[in-house]
Image (tube, rainbow, N blue to C red):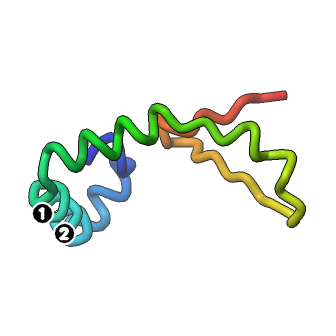
Amino acid sequence: MERWFTEDFRERSPQAIARMREMFLATKADGYIGCGETNRDMDHRPLLPKISAATLVIAGKHDPATHARSQ
């Protein structure tokens, strides 16, 4: 849960963390691994020029999976 939720949130919302932990533990390992492999392997950059709608991209300051780069 440490990778998904900040320490502050975990301390503030133990019930939510307990529900997420239960859901995570109920997930079959091969399904979780498959999802991780899919996320690792997908590259949608060639599709970016086709996006014509206004788009907001958000990267979480505390999310180790979405590193915001300073420009």
Q: Which image quarter is the C terminus in?
A: top right
Q: Are the two marked residues, 1 and 2, in contact with CB atoms closer than 8 angstroms?
A: yes
Secondary element at image label 1: helix
- Taking the image as shown, residue 30 lies to the left or right of residue 4, namely left
Q: Residue 18 location, x and y as percent?
A: 16, 64
Depth order, front residue of 61/53? 53
Q: Which residue is mark 1?
A: 22
Q: Which residue is mark 2?
A: 19
Q: Image height check: is 29 above or below 23?
A: above
> Dot 2: within a 10 Å radius of its alpha carbon, few (fewer than 14), some, or many (20 or more) residues?
few
Depth order, front residue of 7/34? 34
Residue 14, disc: none
- Taking the image as shown, residue 69 lies to the left or right of residue 24, namely right
Q: Type of residue at label 2?
A: Arg
Residue sitting at x 34%, y 46%: 35
Count of labels shown? 2
Residue sitting at x 14%, y 45%: 29
Residue sitting at x 10%, y 60%: 26
Q: Image height check: is 28 above or below 14?
A: above
Q: Type of residue at label 1?
A: Glu
- Taking the image as shown, residue 54 lies to the left or right of residue 22, namely right
Depth order, front residue of 52/22? 52
Q: Quadrant of residue 12?
A: bottom left
Residue sitting at x 66%, y 42%: 44
Q: Image height check: is 3 above or below 19?
A: above
Q: Image height check: is 55 above or below 41?
A: below
> Dot 1: within a 10 Å radius of its alpha carbon, few (fewer than 14), some, or many (20 or more) residues?
few
Secondary element at image label 2: helix
Q: Quadrant of residue 51?
A: bottom right
Q: Quadrant of residue 16?
A: bottom left
Q: Residue 53 location, x and y as percent?
A: 86, 66
